[in-house]
Image (cartoon, rainbow, N blue to C red):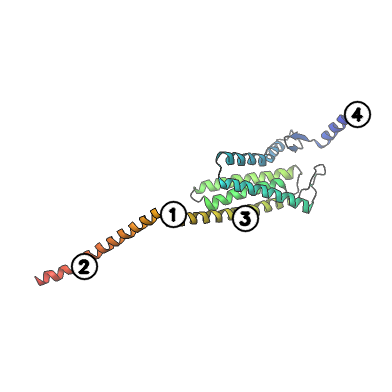
Amino acid sequence: MPIIMQSIYSKQSELYNVSSFQTTYIYNPRDFLSTISALLALLPLEVVVVYLTLIYCRREVEVILIYIGQIICQLLNVHLKEKIQQPRPNPLIKGYGMPSNHAQFTSYFTGYMILWMFFRARYLPKIYYTRNTIVLAFLLISICFSRVYFKYHTIWQVIVGVLVGTAFSTICELAASFKAKCIFLHQRHDERGTPINRKRMAGLEAKTSNTAEESNARTVIILNRPHQSYQK
């Protein structure tokens, strides 16, 4: 019996020409484009590793919020798949395909990074923004192409995934920008209200008033000089 099952599985693998590659499958392992597409399909796992590394090493609140938004975006993807229940183009692959998980994941990440550079990193050179935007857009297009090339998703499933991920990243970035602006204004208000800064502001006001009085006195002296010389 095991020999029979082994022969059946080998015939099926030859029929569909499927080769296992980590957590993905490529149709033709001899095809260079398939190998590149399979490597690109692993990008979400690499992004998660980057998230966790930054959270552990730097412990920045914004990185944690971006990662939380990424998780919520993926939960939204699962919910939409269960509601829409559109099958994948390849019947051998289990699960629903609308919207594409990889496309939504990558579009959230790339969209958030592009918006962050545009709204909150304007101090960087323009070439930096242009170069990174091109690289992120190329990664997104490549991953979307790989999902269609593998026949994991249809074109519309990928497009909907990109739209959902981009919309969600826009909402998260606008909320984060508004929160950061509120914190910045609150800190400036607190700095102006501290006793040290009050003394500093009082000193500046006194210095300004003294300078104004000295300037007025000099003006009066200059105006009175011709009159004094005439009397003499």
Image quadrant where residue 54 sits: top right
Residue drawn at (67%, 51%), measured in percent from left and top? Answer: 165
Q: Which mark is residue 220?
A: 2
**Local secondary structure at mark 3:** helix
Tags 4 and 2 touching, CB below 8 Å: no
Tell me which numbered mark, 2 or 3, is placed earlier along the sequence: 3
Tell me which numbered mark, 4 or 3, is placed earlier along the sequence: 4
How far apart in space, not on screen, are marks 2 and 3 (Cα)?
Answer: 62 Å
What amino acid is at disc 4? Met
**Local secondary structure at mark 1:** helix
Q: In the rendering, at what x and y percent does residue 43 appear?
A: 66, 40
Tell me which numbered mark, 2 or 1, is placed earlier along the sequence: 1
What amino acid is at disc 2? Val
Q: In the displayed structure, would residue 231 be above or below residue 156? A: below
222 or 122: nearer the viewer: 222
232 or 156: nearer the viewer: 232
Q: In the displayed structure, would residue 110 be above or below residue 221? A: above
Q: Which residue is mark 4?
A: 1
Image quadrant where residue 21 sits: top right
How far apart in space, not on screen, are marks 1 and 4 (Cα)?
Answer: 79 Å
The quadrant of the picture occupied by the N terminus is top right
**Local secondary structure at mark 4:** loop
Name the mark nearer the viewer: 4 or 2. Answer: 2
217 or 152: nearer the viewer: 217
Q: Which residue is mark 1?
A: 191
Q: Which residue is mark 3?
A: 171
Tell me which numbered mark, 3 or 1, is placed earlier along the sequence: 3
